[in-house]
Image (cartoon, helix red, strand yellow):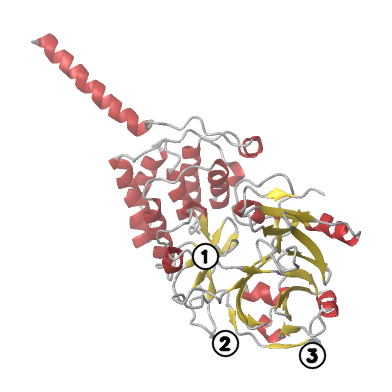
């Protein structure tokens, strides 16, 4: 009897020990994730990552450290103990929710505590990168999977700490790991309320314009984004777009939504008309959120979120209808060159700049992305200007602007899949074999390569 009892106790202990080991070292650890060597060179080797559900004690810790804090912002002994449980879980996926919470922390001591827990989960001394940006860069670069039910925790943090995003954080075609806060509030003003102040990045609807001759305020070397639709030309000065970041306009009889991402050096023009009859014209606004340092825009009419770089609806009713907006060419050039080539152009009026005169490109963003982007395709420097386009076959290709400009000025032909680059007003645009616009635009390399990871690159 004693031997049988001892045997049974050993079986019980074996089962208990096995369960404990599943908590400390979860089953199915992913040991074969392969990353490019340039990622390992920059960030080191990634930690082992478990798969599958998390244990009940981890769920309880997530509730205390994340959900309870989002509902009632405070940090006490219960949260400290819960954070220790998460840090000791050996599950790097937990670092994502810690990183999300870090984004909103202003207390230096709490920042150190949260960053320390994230570093323990990632198995790395983060040193000077022991902050939200450093933690998130590692998570992105290593492509650490999100934990189960991640959107539930992320939604609680973001909507609990900043109002106005309830309809943004919903299921859709979004990699929620890469969504972060840009530090501003959502622009949720109704359509055509340009004059209403907001604590946000204020879009301009139906902006007032003037002739080139009347735009005496605009210097000859000022950067403008030029758009031509059905023969009608308009210049959108960068000085205004750095303040507004979003314009809803009508040009050449077509409706347009024109976002400018200062972080990506990218102005784009999307047609917001010619859509199926059951879709009302999207009116685009800035959400205050970012995806890998690229602005997240949304439609105030339907509440749908768009991938700003791709023009594709990724949540809401327009996502369910599979809406993909078509693009017009945007030419980045100087005011002098634009008006010389297009003397009948109109241009936005100075008042739309709201008395501000920013130059983010040469100041705030001059030393590289200021928000986490993770790894960057090393074929070009992060802030190399490229002309990007997607061919009718769906192939993305980038042309380094400097090299392409020199080649075109020398009379060379730059073509890819029956798409040709041509000079226009000192800038570059893409056309098909019949001379029709393809929908190209200029951007920083890091942004283009992130949203088109399989992009071709013309090397010259």
Decide which of tag 1 and tag 3 comes sooner along the chain: 3
Q: Residue at x 79, y 58 (%)?
A: 401
> What label does residue 306 carry, if any?
1
Decide which of tag 3 and tag 2 comes sooner along the chain: 2
**Can residue 357 be seen from the camera position used here?**
no
Lateral position of residue 334 relative to residue 4, left or right: right
Decide which of tag 2 and tag 1 comes sooner along the chain: 2
Q: Nearer the viewer, mark 1 or mark 3?
A: 1
Residue nearest the viewer, comparing 405 with 192:
405
Q: Residue 5 placed where, x, y %?
A: 12, 15
Give the residue furthest to the left: 1
User: Secondary structure beneath disc 2?
Assistant: loop
User: Secondary structure beneath disc 1?
Assistant: strand
Q: How many marks?
A: 3
421 versus 220 height, above or below: above
Lateral position of residue 254 relative to residue 193, left or right: right
Q: Which residue is mark 2?
A: 195
Q: Residue 191 placed where, x, y %?
A: 51, 83
Task: Find the distance from the CA under tag 2 to the CA under tag 1.
Answer: 25 Å
Task: Find the distance from the CA under tag 3 to the CA under tag 2.
Answer: 22 Å
Q: Which residue is mark 3?
A: 214
Q: Quadrant of residue 215?
A: bottom right
């Amino acid at each position: 009897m004693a031997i049988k009892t001892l045997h049974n106790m050993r079986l019980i202990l074996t089962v208990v020990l096995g369960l404990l080991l599943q908590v400390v070292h979860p089953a199915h650890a992913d040991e074969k994730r392969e990353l490019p060597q340039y990622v390992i060179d920059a960030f080191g080797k990634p930690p082992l990552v478990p798969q599958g559900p998390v244990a009940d004690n981890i769920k309880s810790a997530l509730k205390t450290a994340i959900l309870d804090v989002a509902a009632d912002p405070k940090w006490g002994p219960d949260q400290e103990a819960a954070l220790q449980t998460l840090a000791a879980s050996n599950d790097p996926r937990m670092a994502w929710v810690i990183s999300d919470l870090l984004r909103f922390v202003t207390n230096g001591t709490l920042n150190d505590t949260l960053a320390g827990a994230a570093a323990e989960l990632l198995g790395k001394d983060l040193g000077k990168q022991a902050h939200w940006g450093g933690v998130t860069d590692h998570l992105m670069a290593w492509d650490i999977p999100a934990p189960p039910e991640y959107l539930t925790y992320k939604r609680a943090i973001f909507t609990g700490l900043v109002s106005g995003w309830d309809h943004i954080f919903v299921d859709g075609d979004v990699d929620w790991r890469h969504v972060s806060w840009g530090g501003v509030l959502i622009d949720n003003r109704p359509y055509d309320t340009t004059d209403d102040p907001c604590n946000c990045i204020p879009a301009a609807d139906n902006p007032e314009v003037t002739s080139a001759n009347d735009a005496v305020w605009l210097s000859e070397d000022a950067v403008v984004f030029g758009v031509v639709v059905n023969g009608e030309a308009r210049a959108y000065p960068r000085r205004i777009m750095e303040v507004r970041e979003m314009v809803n306009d009508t040009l050449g009889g077509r409706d347009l939504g024109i976002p400018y991402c200062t972080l990506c050096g990218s102005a784009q023009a999307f047609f917001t008309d010619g859509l199926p009859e059951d879709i009302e014209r999207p009116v685009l606004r800035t959400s205050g959120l970012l995806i890998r340092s690229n602005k997240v825009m949304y439609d105030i009419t339907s509440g749908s979120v768009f991938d700003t770089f791709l023009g594709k609806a990724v949540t809401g009713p327009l996502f369910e209808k599979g809406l993909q907006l078509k693009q017009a060419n945007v030419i980045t050039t100087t005011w002098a060159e634009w008006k010389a080539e297009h003397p009948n152009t109109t241009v936005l009026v100075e008042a739309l700049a709201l008395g501000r005169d920013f130059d983010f490109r040469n100041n705030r963003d001059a030393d590289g992305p200021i928000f986490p982007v993770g790894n960057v395709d090393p074929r070009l420097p992060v802030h190399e200007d490229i002309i990007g386009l997607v061919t009718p076959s769906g192939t993305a290709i980038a042309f380094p602007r400097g090299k392409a400009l020199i080649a075109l000025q020398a009379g060379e032909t730059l073509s890819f899949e029956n798409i040709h680059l041509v000079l226009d007003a000192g800038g570059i645009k893409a056309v098909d074999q019949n001379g029709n616009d393809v929908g190209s635009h200029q951007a920083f390399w890091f942004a283009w390569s992130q949203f088109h990871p399989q992009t071709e690159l013309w090397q010259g």
